[in-house]
């Protein structure tokens, strides 16, 4: 089997972007868009320098250095596999606990964009307020020692300070993480951290640095033995970090940059002032759908997402929630039919080649549920409809966090707050209000008596009738309890 190689002279590339967080998603998404652009003979001064702030990043650096910074990306669908070597990255900054090499690289005038994939939970957001938390221990430490920052945001602040002092135009900070308003969230983190040590710098950053919002989308599962075996089948057996992904990809960005940008519209990127509409569509329908699928699949011992979609009950469960409770509350999006988008998403979930795991979808629910599920619950209540399916999905999350699956087998911890969630979930079996009462997750919904009653009915049904029994009730339209809204 052949492997497509870069169709440009990598020796002529020069850096324009520092990207922090060289995980699978970045290498299957941003890096492939740039690889395509370079193949057109465009933007050769926008190559990527990789970077990271964690020990795992040092291991990734070592792996990629051994193959001249090339990444193997294998697209998978029912028609087969296609492999390419992506050459958009030309170096990787040395990983250092004080981030000195990273700060130095970001000081270079030719670096005009600093982009990030540091996960949804990496922005130091206080879950009880949804805002940047300046008291988070790592942030407080960087605020007290701004010259030796340990976080990506501390390094960005230090580099921007150096550029300001040297009279160098600031770079754009481009979040590529799957967060609502990711540019606004990144701005809050950078400006908020700067304010702890230098309020004047914070004001300068807020005025002069662009933080465009962006919607990103491509399913790229974690790498394991299966993915390495695929690379070996293509003759790349020495690659320890290949990436597999679906053919589909999407990137929508606000056209707001401090120091220019590559012409990514030439390779399919959409520049739009309506990023929030695209983002809401994707987060509610795709990420919300993942959250709906993951917990029943894990509880039923189903390992992979495509296997869950092949289960008639889970497929009917997610389709009904999407159709009845999610699509109706999503605002129209330019050039998109929401019903068609939903069907495409469900087809993507069912891709038999991807082998994404239900456990990955279940990870960090305490951070993901407030972004992907709870806003849809809130919007349904605002329109006078009790979202019984979404509440059942939340009850299945609670049941999962109790720590055993439907067969009584232990579930390994799968959330940074696992111990707290497990204790609360077990107490909620007798007192369901304990779960909904987690204000850091459910916010003001925790005090809604009709919602608490509907959740209690759903959780009671899950415990008494089992995962399949509860889903069957919802799919068949059978009541789980009093789910009507009281007069308001």
Image: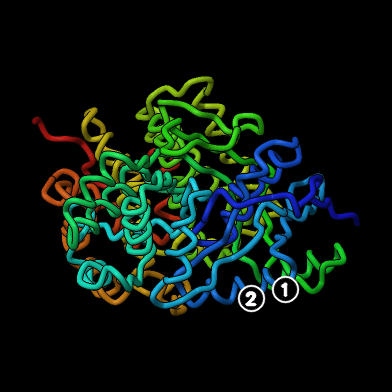
Total marks placed? 2
Q: Find residue 289 and name its label.
A: none
Q: Residues within 10 Å of mark 1 (few under 14, many from 20)?
A: few
Q: Is residue 378 above or below residue 369?
A: above
Q: Is residue 299 above or below residue 478?
A: below
Residue 166: where, in percent of width, then height? Answer: 36, 53
Q: CA distance from mark 1 to mark 2?
A: 6 Å
Q: Residues within 10 Å of mark 2 (few under 14, many from 20)?
A: some
Q: Is residue 250 above or below residue 415?
A: above
- Residue shown at the point (26%, 32%) measured from the top left: 385
- Using the rendered image of the protein, determine whether residue 447 is visible from the camera's viewpoint: yes
Asked if labels 2 and 1 touch by Cβ distance under 8 angstroms, the answer is yes
Which residue sits furthest front? 166
- Residue shown at the point (54%, 43%) measured from the top left: 217
Where, by quadrant of the figure, is residue 459 drawn? bottom left
Asked if residue 385 lies left or right of residue 92, the reply is: left
Q: In this rendered view, identify the residue nearer to me: 443 or 254.
A: 254
The quarter of the picture where the C terminus appears is top left
Which residue sits furthest left? 488
Query: What colour scheme has been applied to the protein in the rendered image?
Result: rainbow
Tell me the SS state at disc 2: helix
Q: In this rendered view, identify the residue nearer to me: 290 or 123.
A: 123
Q: In this rendered view, identify the residue nearer to me: 318 or 109.
A: 109
On the image, numbered disc 1 is attached to which residue? Answer: 66
The quarter of the picture where the N terminus appears is bottom right
On the image, numbered disc 2 is attached to which residue? Answer: 62
Asked if residue 71 lies left or right of residue 15, the reply is: right
């Amino acid at each position: 089997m052949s492997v497509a190689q870069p169709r440009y002279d990598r020796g002529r590339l020069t850096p324009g972007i520092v990207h922090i967080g060289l995980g699978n998603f970045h290498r299957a998404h941003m890096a492939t868009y740039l690889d395509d652009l370079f193949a057109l003979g465009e933007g050769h001064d926008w190559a990527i320098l990789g970077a990271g702030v964690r020990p795992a990043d040092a291991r990734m650096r070592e792996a990629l250095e051994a193959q001249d910074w090339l990444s193997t990306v294998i697209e998978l669908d029912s028609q087969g596999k296609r492999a390419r070597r992506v050459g958009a990255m030309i170096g990787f900054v040395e990983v250092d606990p004080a981030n000195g090499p990273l700060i130095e690289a970001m000081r270079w005038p030719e670096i005009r964009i600093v982009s990030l994939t540091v996960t949804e939970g990496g922005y130091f957001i206080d879950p009880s307020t949804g805002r940047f938390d300046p008291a988070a221990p790592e942030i407080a430490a960087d605020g007290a020692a701004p010259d030796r920052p340990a976080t990506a945001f501390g390094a960005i602040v230090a580099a921007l300070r150096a550029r300001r002092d040297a009279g160098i135009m600031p770079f754009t900070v481009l979040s590529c993480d799957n967060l609502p308003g990711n540019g606004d969230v990144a701005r809050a983190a950078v400006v908020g951290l700067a304010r702890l040590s230098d309020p004047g710098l914070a004001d300068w950053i807020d005025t002069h640095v662009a933080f465009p919002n962006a919607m990103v989308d491509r399913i790229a599962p974690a790498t394991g033995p299966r993915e390495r075996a695929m690379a070996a089948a293509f003759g790349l057996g020495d690659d320890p970090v290949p990436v597999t992904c679906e053919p589909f990809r999407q990137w929508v960005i606000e056209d707001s940059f401090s120091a220019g940008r590559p012409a990514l519209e030439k390779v399919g990127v959409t520049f739009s002032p309506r990023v929030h509409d695209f983002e809401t569509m994707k987060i509610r329908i795709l990420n919300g759908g993942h959250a709906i699928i993951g917990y029943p699949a894990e509880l039923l011992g189903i390992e992979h997402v495509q296997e869950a979609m092949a289960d008639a009950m889970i497929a009917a469960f997610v389709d009904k929630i999407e159709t009845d409770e999610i699509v109706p509350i999503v605002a129209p999006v330019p050039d998109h039919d929401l019903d068609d988008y939903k069907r495409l998403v469900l087809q993507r979930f069912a891709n038999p080649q991807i082998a994404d795991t239900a456990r990955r979808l279940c990870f960090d629910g305490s951070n993901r549920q407030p972004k992907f599920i709870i806003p849809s619950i809130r919007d349904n209540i605002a329109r006078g409809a009790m979202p019984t399916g979404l509440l059942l999905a939340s009850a299945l999350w609670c049941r999962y966090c109790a720590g055993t699956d439907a067969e009584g087998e232990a579930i390994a911890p799968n959330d940074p707050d696992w111990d707290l969630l497990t204790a609360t979930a077990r107490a909620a079996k007798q007192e369901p209000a304990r779960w909904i009462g987690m204000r850091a997750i459910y916010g003001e919904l925790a005090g809604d008596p009709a919602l608490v009653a509907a959740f209690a009915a759903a959780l009671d049904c899950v415990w008494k009738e089992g995962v399949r029994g509860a889903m069957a009730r919802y799919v068949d339209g059978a009541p789980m309890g009093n789910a009507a809204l009281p007069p308001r």
